[in-house]
Amino acid sequence: MATQVPRQAIYFTKTFLAASARHGFSGGLKKAAAGANPVLMGIEAASAVLRAVDSYLQLCQARAHRDGLSALIPEEQRRLKLERKQLEEDINLARREMAQIALVRQAMGRMTLGCVALTRHCMDELTIIRNSDLPDIQAFEDTLERLMEADRALRRSLEYFNNSVS
């Protein structure tokens, strides 16, 4: 709270000091009181009291605001703790899902490599059959067509897997 000295109090003090130097303490008090306006002094005193009361009310409001906020802090802490726990659970779930997806991808990769190796082996066998002395062209074409259809089905399933997992 800022201390503000009323103008009439300054005038009264100045007049009192000057008059008491010439006329003594009681004479100076009479002269200073005669020169001061009692109505203005009363108004300024009442204004000073009102400022003090206003300052006290602001202090009470600040305390009430502080106490209200301090009552909210434990509730906020509980709420944030619950949110933090939920986020940790979500993160752990996402990690488990990612690990599971990675395992499925690894299994699909191993299966794909096996299918590719088997397809190459079959193609090599078909090439050997075709290059033999008396190849059965119709059996060769039927087997080749089945092999190509299996290859297309494998490619479609891998494409579907890649689109559905990612």
Image (cartoon, grey):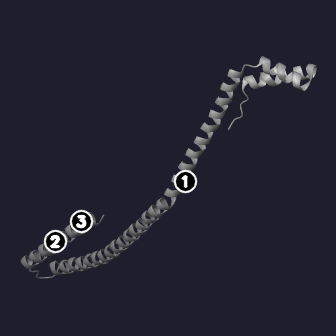
What distance separates the C-alpha of mark 3 from that of mark 2? 16 Å
Residue at x 31%, y 75% (from the top left corner):
104
In x, y percent, where is residue 29? 84, 24
| Residue 63 falls left or right of residue 75 | right
Query: Circle 3: is it few (<14), some (14-19), or many (20+) Cα within 10 Å?
Result: few
User: Which residue is tagged 3?
Assistant: 159
User: Which residue is tagged 2?
Assistant: 148
Dot 1 falls on a residue whose secondary structure is helix
| Residue 156 falls left or right of residue 25 | left
In x, y percent, where is residue 163? 26, 63
Q: Nearer the viewer, mark 3 or mark 2?
A: 3
- In primary-sequence order, the first of circles 1 and 3 is 1
Residue at x 76%, y 26% (from the top left corner):
9
Query: Circle 1: is it few (<14), some (14-19), or many (20+) Cα within 10 Å?
Result: few
- In primary-sequence order, the first of circles 1 and 2 is 1
In this rendering, the answer to whether 123 lies above or below 35 is below
- In primary-sequence order, the first of circles 3 and 2 is 2
In x, y percent, where is residue 146? 12, 75
Of the numbered discs in the image, which one, if any, rests on residue 67? 1
Q: Amino acid at mark 1?
A: Asp
Residue at x 35%, y 71% (from the top left corner):
97
In this rendering, the answer to whether 92 lies above or below 37 is below
What distance separates the C-alpha of mark 1 from that of mark 3? 62 Å
Residues at discs 1 and 2 in contact (Cβ within 8 Å): no
Q: Amino acid at mark 2?
A: Met
Q: Nearer the viewer, mark 1 or mark 2?
A: 1
Instruction: State the residue in front, 13 or 130.
Output: 13
